Image: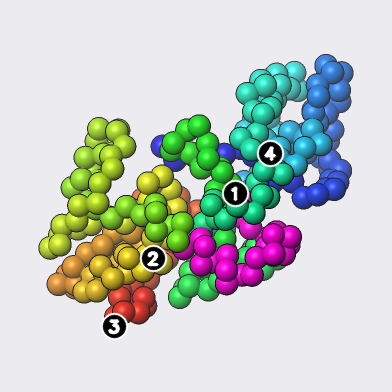
Amino acid sequence: MRSSCNYQVAPQGAERSSKMNRVEKLNEELKRRGAEFTVREHEKWVNGVYYKGLMLWSNKNINPIIYDADILTDAEIDTAVDKLIRFHEMTAEPPIEYEEMMDPDWFREHLTIRLYSSRAKEHFTKEEVVYRDCLDMAMALYVFIPCSDEYSECGAAVHYDVLEELELTEQEAFEIAKKNIEKEVVYSSMELMMGELLTGEKMEFNEVDEEGINVLTNTKRMYGAVGILTESIQKKLEGKWIIPSSVHECIILPNTIPLETCETILKEVNDTQLQTEEVLSYSVYCMRDGKFTRA
């Protein structure tokens, strides 16, 4: 099961007043119990979809967030606060301190890229996230934070002011990120990948079926579709159809299969098998004369 980290890098000096009676009541009860934190509304954006949650604020640069509809709406205040306190106890120590994350060497080592649908562009522009167009998709800089759960991923989108603080140009940052992605790419046959799904055990392999179906992802199996941007993979995809089956992986098919069939497969997967935030594109891609392009 894929999951995401419940931490958020808070803007320096951020001040947000609670605007919901519900939040005010939660904070009143937290204060009465002597809690070392307050809660603030937080909205999480994931590839065009917004989720409401509560940030557990304790004047730190990195604060945990809980996404629980009952706490926000239906649960009794006492019950909701019990949940918040338990969650705070479990997440009080962030996986990394802000100062460590802003160390230039650490930042470069953990810099990566995520691919998103075209819906993301408006959000990235508004939030000043560093991104570039990639055909009908968007590729955004992201800093990865290692988590204890190998199938989870923590991190944060990279904003222009962060690059400025670290004295990195946009071009340098994307080049560093692509080199990091190269280290994580997994390109293997569908048969072997299905074996992993059936056993529930993570496997390390890069054995392809030249005449059959292959899968492109990464070692985390999360946001692995970005592997199509790497030179080492692109060299292997001449004569193949690239189906962006989700933000997490691409399906690679031989071009002996009709393009119309690939388009039908992609639409079926997007419309029936994925959550909205997992949809990457409705376009089939290919490598044509060494160039990544729409089919």
Q: Which mark is residue 106?
A: 1
In front: label 1 or label 4: 1
Instruction: Report how far apart the C-alphas of labels 2 and 3 lie in the structure.
Output: 16 Å
Q: Amino acid at mark 1?
A: Trp
What residue do we see at 67% from left, 21% from top? Answer: 89
| Badge 2: residue crowd in 10 Å (few <14, some 14–19, many ≥20) | some
The foreground one among 155 and 18 is: 155
Residues at marks 2 and 1 touching, judged by CB atoms closer than 8 Å = no
Q: Amino acid at mark 4?
A: Glu
| Badge 3: residue crowd in 10 Å (few <14, some 14–19, many ≥20) | few
| Mark 2 residue element | loop
Magenta span:
156-178
Q: Amino acid at mark 3?
A: Asp
Q: Earlier in the sequence, mark 1 or mark 4?
A: 4
Q: Quadrant of residue 53?
A: top right
What residue do we see at 51% from left, 56% from top? Answer: 112
In front: label 4 or label 3: 4
Q: Which mark is residue 289?
A: 3
Instruction: Report how far apart the C-alphas of labels 1 and 4 lie in the structure.
Output: 12 Å
